Image: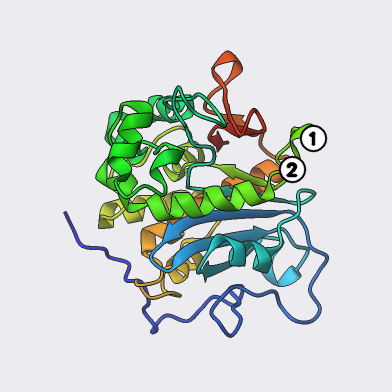
Amino acid sequence: MKKNAYPCGNASLSPDPNLRFDESGRSAAPDSDRPARGYRGIGVDGCPGGWIAVVLEESGNPQTGGRPELTAGVYPDISSLWEALKPLASRDLVLIDMPIGLPEGADGIRNRVEDRNCDRDCRKLLPKRRKSSVFPVPARQALRSDDPSAANAAATERKLSSQSLNILPKIRELDDFIAQHLTPEESGAFALPLAESHPEVAFMRLNAGEAPLHGKKTAEGLAERFAILEQAGIKQAESERLTTLFPRKQAACDDLLDAAALAISALRIVSGRSPARRVTEDGRRQFDYDGRLEMNIVHL
């Protein structure tokens, strides 16, 4: 396996003029004569520094040749990300690589789901070499247990993988955020412009249905993903510079590229250029919070 050929945090590369940041290193809008804001696609992924958000915003700015403006930022938690970006359902879509809606097992309170169909269906979409990127999702009972794997087994008869255990704090954080923003039960709606997605499916859809051949942490895998992003509208020079803007202790290169693929997908969907598809359809769809929140994975 070759080492990463695209070092993160390389200060020798000049930042792209369309990548703007505030004093804390977060993305910021240009100050003065900014054109009217258009649709925004926002891709979010967990990272060592918290959450990485890549934003693609449509604009009439002649300096960009009509291309969407690219910004990025690392946020310590989901609430600060949401407060900074202020997504609006009328023009924004946020696609996040983290489970939305968790199983609670046969004795659950908010649902009786033991295993999410969307995870199974997502694996079916991907070739064998990429199936392992879909981690088993923990039951809600595991989120605050002293022994998460045992709590998960008690609820669903399944133990947790090491990958799932590693991201348990972020799953808990997002689940708490969603619970705080659910609308009253009688309205039966989840109002935030936020949906679960998966970067490997995003790259596959952006690449005419062909999933990357190599893992995302290898030089070959990164090269593949840079090429797919360029084909989808983000020039390789821009995406390469994007990977240099944060030290690895904040965001790894593959985190940024994953978020960028989700941002492209989100922009195409919210602008109406592509329909939103879900991995699970019809009678196999599952819901959390007594039917108010669907467990599904959105893609192009």
Q: Callout 1, which amino acid?
A: Ser
**Left or right: 253 as drawn, with respect to 271:** left
- Residue at image location 54% in from the left, 28% down from the top: 111
Q: How far across and down, in percent of the image, does residue 154 sit?
A: 33, 30
255 over 24 or under it: above or below: above
Toward the viewer: 259 or 214? 259
- Pointer 2 residue: 183
Q: Quadrant of residue 123?
A: top left
Q: How far across and down, in percent of the image, does residue 107 sit?
A: 46, 25
- Pointer 1 residue: 187
- Residue 233 visible in the displayed image: no
Q: Quadrant of residue 218?
A: bottom left
Toward the viewer: 87 or 218? 87
- Residue at image location 36% in from the left, 79% down from the top: 10
Q: Secondary structure at mark 1?
A: helix
Q: Callout 2, which amino acid?
A: Thr
Q: Do residues under tags 2 and 1 come within 8 Å of each other at their CB atoms?
A: yes
Toward the viewer: 169 or 209? 169
Q: Which mark is residue 67?
A: none
Q: Secondary structure at mark 2?
A: loop
